[in-house]
Image (cartoon, rainbow, N blue to C red):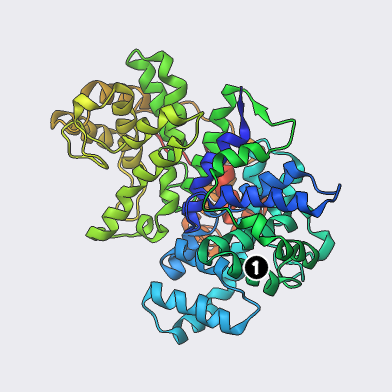
Amino acid sequence: MFRLLGLLGGLSLATDLGTGAPLEESLKRAVVATRLAEALDSRQVDNGDVIYTALLQHLGCTAYAHETAELWGDDVTFVRLAFLTDATRARDLWGTFVGGLAGSTGWSRPRVAATMLTRGRKAGTEAPAATCEIARDASRLLGLPDSVQAGLFHSLTMWDGKGHPSVAGDAIPLATRVMHVASVGVLFALHAGTAEATAQVRRRAGSYLDPAIADVFVDRADELVGDLDEIDAYTALLDAEPDPVHLVADDQIEPVARTFGNLADLKSTWLQGHSGAVADLAASAVQRVGLADHVAAVRVAGHLHDLGRIGVPSRIWNKPGPLSAAERDQAQLHAYHSERILARVPALADLAVLVGQHHERCDGSGYHRGLTGAQLPMPSRVLAAADRFRSLVEDRPYRPALSPAEAGRRLREDARNGGLDGDAVAAVLAGAGLGAGARRPRPGDLTERQVEVLRLVAHGLSNREIAERLGISARTAEHHVQDVYVKIGASTRAGAALFAMEHGLLDKPG
């Protein structure tokens, strides 16, 4: 058995990366939220709900990353600026948000403002809906209670009713209102100190924040956030969890890993389903090389190997041409980020090195450490070969998917040239089968055509583009899309993509 909070606390570093926050901001937000809940002295506050809602506030941070990158280039910077900005104040909106976007895009401020008023309006509606839906659905997949799911679904609400979903005041879950105040307090305490945190909470009271909870923060700011630079945030988080703590069995690590892997894959429509496919293929292959006792660990590592992608701007994963040297450096950091995150999770620390080596090569040509074969254990070699194969048989913005046969030929060539291990390649190709398997049952009572439509929706195609792709009318495509949404219980592209990944419906032959 292990503590779920310990696992999620470590993995929350991924959402820090995805929102451009300093590592451990989520941990510290959760600690401060529980302190604030205790300061309220109200029996209505469930500290268990508060700690999980605050820790996982940004669980849906990748839901609209692809679209944000298409519009602004750097989705991570965009999200960070959005949280630093008080959108109710024109001066702050112009100076912090518009000015920050002008700096990150290289555009003039008038151009940024014009884009916000035109193309940005659609994103302003779709992004909150997708973020809240993914946060709710992912927390359900993590096995968290309905109250936490509801708290996260309301993470973008505002006290005055101007957020999403459109509820106001006491209709917003109490755990969410506590989280909102703690979030602003911790954000600005880490950014500029306690005095600025107090000023920002006071300024946003009555618009974004519950004024009564904001008053408590203002009165006790020093004891709530004054020690954030000194505490061991991970230990403090575990100490703050109320009894009884949430314990789960060891075999529940894999579903948690799968969920976070799917969230990482939402960074780009080109990546959706990759982590789950690598996990399945690597687990099959490692057994074929005689390491049956490594199957469970390699499967979890497969789900989490690309977790660090969350911290890399989506425009890099979406780029149709060659990466610049700077972009390549950013992309290659994802393996380091994945390793660093897992190293902080006691239940997963043994996998950190394995995950960090998934782009290493036996001849020393890989990254991020340039290791050679003698330094790479067989599970690492298998994971590297599985990741390489799956990447080749999946579409990328710079090339179409290769056939399994061609991908196999390239892996064998890599082995002959000394990059990949020959036994690992043979096991991966045997696990891939290089042939059509049995048809997978379709969840949600979806028809074959609806599965086609779901895949296209997940890939970001509009109703008109779906109609053109399938040779049907736009109205028929719209009906198919709405039927799919109803059957799977989703309302956004990101929600549809998460469902498709969870049920393996984006997988390609091989």
Evaluate whether residue 323 shows in this view.
yes
> Residue sitting at 49 percent across and 65 percent down?
68
Q: Amino acid at mark 1?
A: Thr
Q: Quadrant of the C terminus?
A: top left
Q: Residue furthest left?
A: 417
Residue 123 in percent (x, y) is at 56, 69
Residue 322 appears at what percent x and percent y? Answer: 24, 58
Looking at the image, which is closer to me, 118 or 310? 310
Q: Position of residue 273 (x, y in %)?
A: 47, 41
Q: Identify whether 89 is placed above or below 37.
A: below
Q: Residue at x 55, y 55 (%)?
A: 61
Q: Tag 1's secondary structure?
A: helix
Along the viewing direction, whichever of 259 and 23 lies nearer the viewer = 23
Which residue carries the number 1 mark?
Answer: 198
Q: Quadrant of residue 129?
A: bottom right
Circle 1 residues within 10 Å: few <14, some 14–19, many ≥20: many
Q: Position of residue 103 (x, y in %)?
A: 40, 76
Question: Position of 152 compared to 427: left or right?
Answer: right
